[in-house]
Image (tube, rainbow, N blue to C red):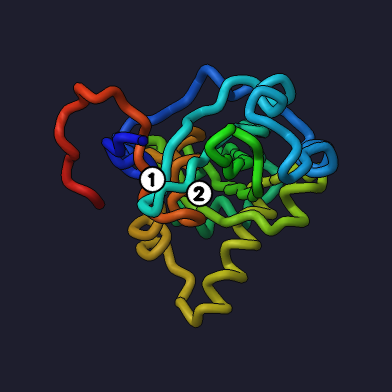
Amino acid sequence: MFKLMIPIGVALALIAGCKNTSSQDNNIDAAHINSVLQRNTTTLSDATLLLGTPAFISVTEDGKKIAGFNLVNKAFTDDFSNNLIKGTMSFGRKASLIPKVTKNVFLELDENNVVTDYKFAGTAWVEKQNFFVKNEANITLSQQEIFEKHDFTAEYIYGRYQQVLLQNNIQHNYKMLSENDSSDCEYKCQLYKNAHDLYGTLYKLQSDKSDTLPEQI
């Protein structure tokens, strides 16, 4: 029986400094993985051969076991192609815009570590370097964007972000961008956030001597 400790998706230690430099070279084809994973057949060991070591193995509040993997963690080259975007997003001050993307897969496992189901998620955002560095324009990737190979330019990400704002009747302005994005949230942090969005609070598997559960978010 699992001992559930330490909320993961968010112990968002997560969030204040979770730059995952060790896995930024991941570039696994999500469409290929989607074609080879087989529900009720593929095991966690099989998946590890395909995907490498899981970023985490956790359980949901109702005891479902989840293994999370990074597929793609990528920073694209600086995007200097759109001066209008630069002027709009930085009030006329020139900024270096670095588009970033992460794609993840989450395996749902039974008691024998056989995959019963799996889900994909992804996020893109722009790292803006000016007088300081901050992340903004965080967007959730569609399934099509996850499975297709796509260059996520700053122009594309800002355009998609603006569409989200308009769909939600939110006025596009710099203050809103600053307040609504996680400025320190990098690759591993985004993976945890995506897991939390799909499954709610997750708990790491710990030994029986683990400390008491910290305050949940």
Tell whether 72 sits left or right of 168: right
**Dividing the image into 4 quarters, which one contains the N terminus?**
top left
Q: Is residue 75 visible?
A: no
**Residue 204 sits in quarter:** top left
The residue tagged 1 is 202
Q: CA distance from mark 2 to mark 1?
A: 11 Å
The mark that comes first in sequence, 2 or 1, is: 2
Q: Pinpoint residue 14: horizontal percent, then vertical percent.
A: 35, 36
Residue under the point 58% across and 33% down: 112
Q: Position of residue 181 (x, y in %)?
A: 41, 53
Residue 189 placement: quadrant: top left
Residue 216, numbered label: none
Q: Which residue shows up at 47% across the image and 47% down it? A: 64
Secondary structure under tag 2 reads helix
Closer to the camera in the image, 108 or 82: 108
Q: Nearer the viewer, residue 213 or 209?
A: 209
Q: Which mark is residue 194?
A: 2
Please state the horizontal and vertical placement of residue 22, each as a whole percent of the image: 52, 17
- Residue count near mark 1 (Cα–Cα under 10 Å), binned few <14, some 14–19, many ≥20: many
Disc 2 residue crowd, few under 14, some 14–19, many 20+, Cα 10 Å: many
Q: Determine whether the residue tagged by mark 1 lies in a helix, strand or loop.
A: strand
Using the image as rendered, state which of residue 118 and residue 174 is in the foreground. Answer: 118
Amino acid type indicated by mark 2:
Asn
Position of residue 216 measured from the top left corner of the image (x, y, whole percent): 22, 49
Q: In the drawing, does residue 2 fall left or right of residue 128?
A: left
* Closest to the observer, 146 or 217: 217
> Quick check: marks 2 and 1 in contact, CB under 8 Å?
no
Q: Amino acid at mark 1?
A: Leu
Q: Is residue 164 visible?
A: yes
Question: Which mark is nearer the camera, 2 or 1?
Answer: 1
Residue drawn at x 58%, y 56% as measured from the top left: 140
